[in-house]
Image (tube, rainbow, N blue to C red):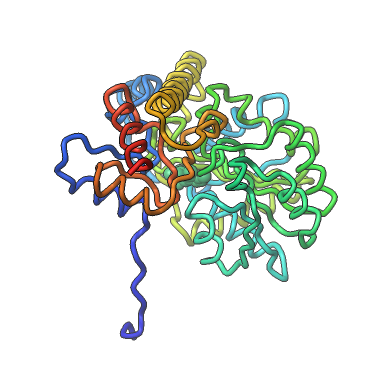
Amino acid sequence: RFNKTRFIPPDAIFALTAEYLQDPFPRKVNLGQGTYRDGEGNPWVLPSVNRARETLSAQGLNHEYLPILGLQAFREATAKVVLGSELLPSRRLSLSGTGALHLAGLLLRVCQSPLPKIYIPEPTWSNHHQVFSSLGFSCESFKYYDHETRDLDIESYYSTLRNAEPKSIVILHACAHNPTGCDPTKEQWREIAQLMKARQLFPLFDAAYLGFNSGNYDEDAFAIRLFVGEMKMEAGICISFAKNMGLYGERVGCFMLATDTKEAAVNTQSMLEMLQRSEVSNPPAFGAKIASQVMGMKDLKEMWFADMVTMSSRIRSMRKALYEHLISFGAPGSWDHLIRQSGMFGFLGLSPEIVLKLKDDYHVYMAGNSRISIAGLNPGNVEYVARSITQCLKD
Ligand code: PMP
């Protein structure tokens, strides 16, 4: 039965972290995995989360199952914070728990026949293709980024949407595009929404960085609110609280679906409940309790918003510091793209050979496509990283 099975190599980013952990070099730097680090390079528990944790344990935590659809307070608070309270009553919503992208795929698979195509930007987060192709979807990559101009290729984007098969699904990074750090402008988002509406394309938002990108939650939720609120489109929204609440290992997420009618919301919610039952049954409770506490209490929500400013500002200052060091060391080439990008990642534009050399000779670890997690930089290592890149390029 298992003799003909194929070996699947481990996920590249997790394998890179394992390699980094084995490396005894004292000045090694991990810019691979996208996890926030403080100015000393340590994981950071958000003060708002710490406070919520204290409140929850003072109230007495139990370990009962959550309902299959997840914690109701969490689902309601998530919808409110993502869509804004004005939008909420005007749209029908069904919500569900973690594994949001996968759950979205499961639902879309049973709702449409024949199976729609899924358009995915190239490059994209490494898991998108896996999630949807493992569900049997045919994934079509479209050019999102121009490696020459090192910027978003908006014309290619528009032309993909103009020529897409009607009723297909399009994956949209709500903000802080991973890995390029290049997002459409507000005007470009408007055009994207109009083109999609005209061809009845279904927007499936992957929203893993709301509030973490700019430090302003409303600003980062602009595209979602435009499609759902202003354009009145049906849309799927996959929310992660890994980055913006620092709840990585707690697996806190939410799938929200905006539908045209109340009946469709009720029905799709019942389908999501059935699908979730066969997947994980009951979603994890602890993180959802923390997140609903943070979003539901006025003072904690304010603290959380301030925490997101702390994280995004530190990342922005490290991006600037890296840029300035590269310029002052005379690193060959132009580095303006680094400053134009936003969010957690810097998309450096280095060749795979240079990426390998940086790891082998300088112990600086980054994804093979030269995406760096800027959060891995701090005042103690940014100069070393810039010098290493410069030397590698000059050798
Ligand atoms: N989408 C994107 C674009 C991401 O970068 C990430 C996190 N790396 C996720 C989804 C998934 O986050 P989670 O840890 O909540 O599964």
Residue plotted at (75% across, 47% down): 155
| Residue in front for this viewpoint, 314 or 305 | 314
Answer with left or right where residue 358 lies relative to residue 136.
left
Residue 309 position in % (x across, y down):
48, 19
**Looking at the image, which residue sits at the far right?**
198
Residue plotted at (64% across, 62% down): 140
- Residue 81 image-quadrant placement: top right
| Residue in front for this viewpoint, 198 or 239 | 198
**Looking at the image, which residue sits at the far top?**
299
Residue 111 position in % (x across, y down):
69, 62
- Residue 290 image-quadrant placement: top left
Residue 215 position in % (x across, y down):
53, 22
Q: Is the N terminus in the top left, top right, bottom left or bottom right quadrant?
A: bottom left
Residue plotted at (78% across, 36% down): 190
Residue 249 appearing in the image:
no
Residue 390 position in % (x across, y down):
36, 36
Q: Where 246 falls versus 251 (above or below)? A: above
Q: How many marks?
A: 0
Q: Where 315 falls versus 127 (above or below)? A: above
| Residue in front for this viewpoint, 372 or 169 | 372
Residue 103 appearing in the image:
yes
| Residue in front for this viewpoint, 231 or 330 | 330
Q: Is the C terminus in the top left, top right, bottom left or bottom right quadrant?
A: top left
Residue plotted at (36% across, 77% down): 6
Answer with left or right where residue 307 lies relative to residue 128.
left
